[in-house]
Amino acid sequence: MHITLKKLHRAYGSLHAVHDISLEIPSNTIYGVIGRSGAGKSTLVRLISLLERPDSGEILFNQNRVDMLDKDELIAQRRRIGMIFQNFNLFSSRSAAKNIAYPLEIAGKDTSFINKRVAELLDMVALAGRGNAPISTLSGGQKQRVAIARALANNPDILFCDEATSALDPQTTRSILDLIRELQQKMNLSVVMITHQMEVVRDACEYVAVLDNGSVVEEGKVVEVFASPKSTTTKEFLANLAPLSQPYEERTKGMVRWSNEGGNYTLRFRGNATGEPVLSRIQKRFEVEFNIRAGGVQHVGNEDVGTLICDIIGEPVEVQKAVASLRESGVLVEEDLA
Amino acid sequence: MMNEIFRLVGNATGETLVMVFASTLFSLLLGLPLGIILCVTGPEEQGGIISKPLLNNVMGRIVNVLRSFPFIILMILLFPLSRIIVGTSIGTVATIVPLSIAAAPFVARIIESALKEVDPGVVQAARAMGSTPMQIILKVLLPEAMPALVSGVTLTIINLIGYSAMAGAIGGGGLGDLAIRYGYQRFRPDVMFFSVVVILILVECIQLIGNTLSARLMAKR
C-alpha cells in the first residue's frame, strides 16, 4: 500500500504538532520516521493511522483519499491497518490467543476460522503453545510478539509501529526488528516505524524521514541520509547513535577479524567516502592513530556498506576532531564509549 | 424469649435481603448504562470514545444533584412513585423503588470511574483495529474493568444495606425497622443488639465475597 501525505497540518490550540508534512511512503518497504519527543511523531502516527483527522491536507492510500471517510468506511479502513505500540496495549482481560483473536472477532469471523488463524499467527511469531498464557506472565518481547500477531491477524496492508521497541532491551529490540523485517517481506506489508532510536532506523528501515518541530527536515534512503546527513537534527541523531550492545561476534558478522577484542568505533563507508583515502588523510591531519580490529561489508538499510571496527588512539581532543572530520567526509561514525 | 428474638430477627433479615438484592439489581439496571454513557461521552483520554462534552456535563450535573440529596428526603419524595409502580408506598416491596433510584446515581459514578481506569492505550489500540463504539464497550471497557466493577458492586450492596436500614425507619421493614421499633421504641436492647449483629455479619460476608471475586479475576490476568 502506497501512502501519500500532502501538506498535513494538525494543531492543538496554538501548538502546531504537525506542520506542512508531505511524504511519499512507497509500498512494500519499511519506512522510518524519527524525531525527538515532541517533534510531532505521535500526532503524525495518529493522523496516518486514521485515529485523528488533519486540520488540513490529504492522506491517500494507493491514491485514494482516506482522511475524509465517514464512520463506517473509517472502521472498515482501520481494519486494513495493523498497529503496534510502545506499551504493547494488549487486553489484560484476555489470554495471548484471545488478544490475537480480537480483530478477527470484531470483523465477524466464525470461531473455527478464528481458532485456526490464531494458531497460525502464534506459530508465525514463535509463540506456539503459549496461547493460553495470561498477558501478565509474558516478557516484554513476548508481549510485543503477541501485539504483532494481533496487528497482522486480519492480513492488513499497512503496519504502523509506534515506538514499538522503545520499551525493550537491545537484544529483544533486535529480535523484534528481525521479526518485523521477516514478516514485512512475507506479507508484502508497508511498514511505518515511528521511533526516536537511530539504531532502529539503521537496523530495519529502508527509507527515513527526520522530524523536528512538526516538520520533515530530511528524508530519503537510509544509506544516503546516514552517509551524508544534511540537517543538524539528523547529524545529532547520528552523533548519538547508541553503541551496538551486541556481542563482538555478532557485530562482526561477515567481516574479517584481526583481533578478538572489539574497538570503540564503528566506521561505515559508502558512496564517495569509499573512493578516497580518508583514514590516512585524517591520520596525517590530526595526532591520532587507527587500530583496526575488523573490517568487511555489512548490510545496512537494505544496502551493502563498508564497515571498519577500530580504536582511535590519541589525545581526547584530537580524537574528537578526527571523528568530526570523518563525519564531514561522509563516514558514519558510531562511538561506543562504554 | 430467645425464640421470639430469632423469629423477629429472622423475618427482618429476610426482608432486608429482599430489599437489598432487588434494589441492587434495579440500581445496576439504571446505573450501568448511565455510567457507561458518562464514561464514553467524557474526555477522550479517559475512555471517551464518543466524546460529547455538553451531554456529559448535563448528565454529570444531574447525577451530582441526585447524589447530594439526603437519602431520607429522597425516599419521601419518591414515595408517590412507589405508589404508581407497585401500588403502595408502605412495606418492603414499596421501598425497593426509592432505594433503587437513590442508589442508581451512585452506581453510575462507580461504573464510570471503573471504566475510566482502563488504560487509554488499550482503548486506542481497539479503535485503531477498527472496533465500533459498541464493540469497545462490550469487548474492551467492561471486561478490562471487571475487577473494579466487582468491587464497585460490592460497595453498592453494602451501601444499600445501610440505606435499607434507614428505609426501615419510614415503614420499609427489615432489620433497621426492627431495631428502631423494638429496640428503641419498646426498650428492647436485646432485639436491637441482634439486629445490628446480623447487619454486621451481612456486611462482612458481602465484603468477603466481593474481595474474593475481585482477587480471582485479577489472578487470572
Image (cartoon, coloured by chain):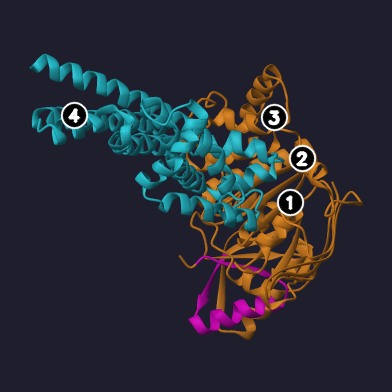
Chain colours: A orange, B cyan
**Residue A228, x across and y down, in percent:** 75, 72
Residue at the disc numbered 4: B195
Task: Please name the amino acid that badge 1 sits on.
Answer: Ser
- How packed mark 3 is, by other alpha carbons closer than 10 Å (few <14, some 14-19, many 20 or more), is many
Instruction: Name the residue: 60% across, 33% down.
Output: B139
Distance from label 3 to label 2 (Cα)?
Answer: 22 Å
Query: Residue A37 falls in which quadrant of the image?
Result: bottom right
Give the Cα distance between marks 1 and 2. 21 Å
> Is A279 positioned to the left or the right of A188 in the image?
left
The residue drawn where x is 70% and y is 49% is A160
Q: Does A331 appear in magenta?
A: yes
**Screen quadrant of the C terminus of chain A:** bottom left
The residue that label 2 is drawn on is A185
**Do we see residue B14 in this rendering?**
yes
Q: Categorize mark 1 by other alpha carbons within 10 Å: few (<14), some (14-19), many (20+).
A: many
Same chain for mark 3 and mark 1? The answer is: yes
Contact between labelled residues 4 and 3, with CB atoms less than 8 Å apart? no
The stretch in magenta equals A310-336
Identify which amino acid the numbered label 4 is placed on. Ser
Which residue position is annotated with label 3?
A104
| Pointer 2 and pointer 4 on the same chain | no
x, y percentage for residue B142?
A: 54, 36
Q: Secondary structure at mark 2?
A: helix
Looking at the rendered image, the disc whose residue lies closer to the viewer, 3 or 2, is 3
Marked residue chain, label 1: A
Label 1 or label 2, whichever comes before in sequence order? 1
Separation (CA) of disc 2 from disc 4:
73 Å
What is the secondary structure assignment of the residue under circle 4?
Answer: helix
